[in-house]
Amino acid sequence: MAIEWYPGHMSKARREIAEVIQGFDVVIEVLDARLPASSANPVLQELRRDKPWIKILNKHDLADPAVTKEWVRHLEQHSGVRALPLQAKNRQETGMIAKLCRRLAPHRAKPGKPLRAMIIGIPNVGKSTLINTLAGKRMARVGDKPAITTCQQQIDLRNGIFLHDTPGLLWPDMRNQTHAYRLAASGAIGENALDYTDVALFAATFMAERYPQQIAARYRLESLPETATAILEEIGRRRGCLATGGDIDLHRTAELFLRELRAGLLGRISFEGPGEEFADPLADDSETLASPLPPADPTEP
Ligand code: G4P
């Protein structure tokens, strides 16, 4: 089953974001450090121009540190862009954001000249967690309404910086099959948007190729079976995920495997490095390849 999750409103969002961005000194874009390309919203990349921009690589506690370093180098090649890996609940790490904002907009954050920063990102990357840490208290989010201009929330960080939270209107680019599967494997998209077994097969294929020792160590596999299905079956056997009659329950195994992968129990992993944004690890594996995604949003001009 293909992942079918592609909400409309893209051109409306493009117009609204283009308008809203004008009013800010710095944009803080929150990405998932495990998949900085797939968790980015394509509209934002188009609209950046020369606006000072901080790319937060959040959840870096779950990502492969060597790959995260490569991402920082890669992203900072663009002028006016700073990349900051962090863990949204970590006060010390998030403290760097104010420093970077001041560096990127040195003419602001002075008495009478507050620095206006906008925080933005697709759902589940950790925006609420980050806002709560920065604000020092639990903030009610503005909700996921398609009305950026009317639903902003302004938070005074009491250091000369005003943070604007925008409704969670942004969504990832689900037209790209590889992006969609990486997002699904990371847990960034809703449960009803995906077939667990397909996603687990994708993730098992990926782990066997990139992090074979980590998957083998977690499930105490002496050698890795050759196909993704056989890997999952072996995991199911070892974890007692059995259906009536003693067969392996592949769905339950997929749930267990994805839960553990997302929680970091298979170690720190990155689903993509710079330059691998559009790679398709399933290209040669027809066994695990789902049917293609539906075409792009029909409301799109
Ligand atoms: P959003 O506003 O962008 O939609 O994301 P939100 O802050 O709700 O975070 C989504 C999930 O990601 C939450 O987990 C949150 O705890 C987790 N998270 C956020 N930042 C980090 C981080 O730096 N590292 C790790 N490992 N996890 C992070 P949840 O299970 O959905 O909710 P909860 O039970 O933790 O509240």
Image: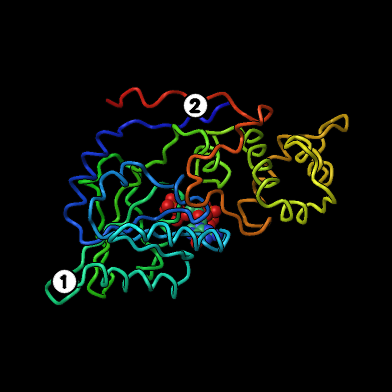
Q: Nearer the viewer, residue 217 or 272?
A: 272
Instruction: Check disc 2 and report the residue beneath it.
Output: 293
| Coloration mode | rainbow
Relative horizontal placement of residue 242, taking residue 255 as reference (left or right): right
Q: How many marks?
A: 2
In percent of width and height, residue 29 lies at: 35, 55
- Vertical order, 200 against 88 (above or below): above
Q: Nearer the viewer, residue 193 or 295?
A: 295
Instruction: Check disc 1 and report the residue beneath it.
Output: 107
**Disc 1 residue type (three-letter):** His
Q: Nearer the viewer, residue 270 or 19?
A: 270
Label disc, if present, on residue 231 of the rendered structure: none
**Disc 2 residue type (three-letter):** Leu
- Vertical order, 18 against 24 (above or below): above
What residue is rendered at 84% in x and 46% in y? Answer: 238
Q: Which callout, 2 or 1, points at the residue further toward the start of the chain?
A: 1
- Vertical order, 299 against 19 (above or below): above
What residue is rendered at 56% in x and 37% in y? Answer: 280
Relative horizontal placement of residue 198, taking residue 13 as reference (left or right): right
- Quarter in which the C terminus is drawn: top left
Relative horizontal placement of residue 138, taking residue 231 as reference (left or right): left
Mark 1 element type:
loop
In percent of width and height, residue 129 lies at: 44, 60
Relative horizontal placement of residue 237, taking residue 53 as reference (left or right): right
